Amino acid sequence: MTEIEKKPAGLSTSSLETDDQKKNASINFIVSDYNFEKFMMMFILGTTGDAMDVKMNVFFTFWGLFNLKKDAKPKVGNVPYRGIPMPYKGMATRMFKKRLKKFGIEDLWGMLRDAVESGNLKLYPCQMTMDLMGIKREELLDFVEDPVGAASFLEMSEGGRIVSL
Amino acid sequence: MTEIEKKPAGLSTSSLETDDQKKNASINFIVSDYNFEKFMMMFILGTTGDAMDVKMNVFFTFWGLFNLKKDAKPKVGNVPYRGIPMPYKGMATRMFKKRLKKFGIEDLWGMLRDAVESGNLKLYPCQMTMDLMGIKREELLDFVEDPVGAASFLEMSEGGRIVSL
Amino acid sequence: MTEIEKKPAGLSTSSLETDDQKKNASINFIVSDYNFEKFMMMFILGTTGDAMDVKMNVFFTFWGLFNLKKDAKPKVGNVPYRGIPMPYKGMATRMFKKRLKKFGIEDLWGMLRDAVESGNLKLYPCQMTMDLMGIKREELLDFVEDPVGAASFLEMSEGGRIVSL
């Protein structure tokens, strides 16, 4: 982790290189958690939006960045309902994955890559999180964009909606 | 759980039947957790918005769907502050409910039904969650709308705001 | 906690005094959790937005209100990733704070105050939460605005974006 320009915080990282394509995004998601539920919300909205030709940016910050690692395996974070017979998070995750297959949803990262390659979905790692956690570009999936800071995120979401999942 | 149309994920369920009324909604909430805090945020914004004649849709997905079950009893999910003398989630929930009575807030589901019946608030169960968790329409409160998928949600929120609580 | 006007819930508190300045806010954040992650998201977006001259309101409700107390010390809420060698939340919090210093981010509340004093950022305590939890105005930081209710929040966010962090 190197020492970089100081304050204002969000401006300290590769910002201001926003292009027109980004500005046109209709929805700008923020993912800050690393669990199966939030990953799936991003996945379903991202792939569905792609099928509907909606332009979307997703900004992965804090624990959310781990969803973009090559070895990502988000697990169910909460099992809040007594009525559901699933005592363990790992078990619950496997059960959901098995059931999702019936919907034709199996290769999660492959489907995500398709949505990215169609040009509708862009996945942005948070630069500051990478620096804070010592995560390198090569640890991330190859179809994510270059890391951006908070200033870039605010700029690219101008005129669009912002949704923190 | 029956096998239904495959990919794209969000399009697999009863989508595309969006009518004009839905398109006019000013705020489109997403509720994905099942706990007292998030339920109350939805409740306060929903009933307050109704009083102000704001059109609102709420989309209940993942654990959030359990808020719409006839036997729903969301409990406090977090008690993060040492300064508060409430060791147990059930106790904290009861304490909040008792204090809410002083604000005239007692029959939570009755007040929610009123906001729905006024036509300002619409509560949508997520179709995929119902299929994934094996929850049937008759287990849900009678004043919720028919289930919709992610594509419907994206369509009905066009032109409005999206807020994931 | 005094008994105040009854229903509709959000209208029961000091609402409707929205002025033009508030209406112009581009982003209206909701913070309902009390932990380091959500505090930092608000902090980074708030101070970065200030540097970019973006008008922002932040509404602190439920546990989120504790971020505004004079003795606030939000701690890391989740350590979801096995790969990270930080067994304890307090330890993780200290580690992040130490690393943030390298970005020039040390005096968190001082920097927040600067953004407030520049006129771009306004921090609103939720009136109902203060009543529910018995928290008094004098327990809160001196640079926060007067408490508002849900109706005020909905009014002041009209025309702007709403983001629940």
Image: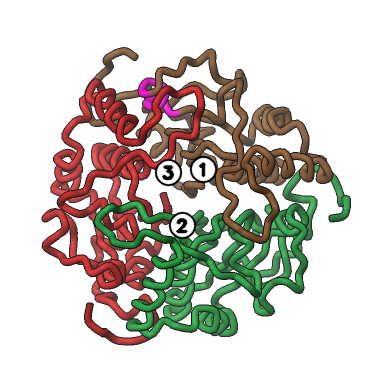
Chain colours: A green, B red, C brown
Q: Amino acid at mark 2?
A: Gly
- List the residue tagged with mark 2: A77
Q: Residue at x 77, y 66 (%)?
A: A136
Q: CA distance from mark 3 to mark 1?
A: 13 Å
Q: Chain of mark 1?
A: C
| Same-chain check, marks 3 and 2 | no
**Neighbour class for label 2 at 10 Å: few (<14), some, many (≥20)?**
some
Q: Is residue B38 above or below residue A132?
A: above
For the record, the magenta segment spans C126-132
**Neighbour class for label 3 at 10 Å: few (<14), some, many (≥20)?**
some
- List the residue tagged with mark 1: C29
| Spot occupied by residue C23 in the image (x, y as percentages of width and height) | 48, 38
Q: Label 1's element?
A: strand
Look at discs 3 and 1 and give the one toward the viewer: 1
- List the residue tagged with mark 3: C158
Residue B27 appears in view? no
- For this view, does B139 lie left or right of residue C87? left
Q: Is residue A14 above or below residue B132?
A: above
Q: Residue furthest front?
A: A87
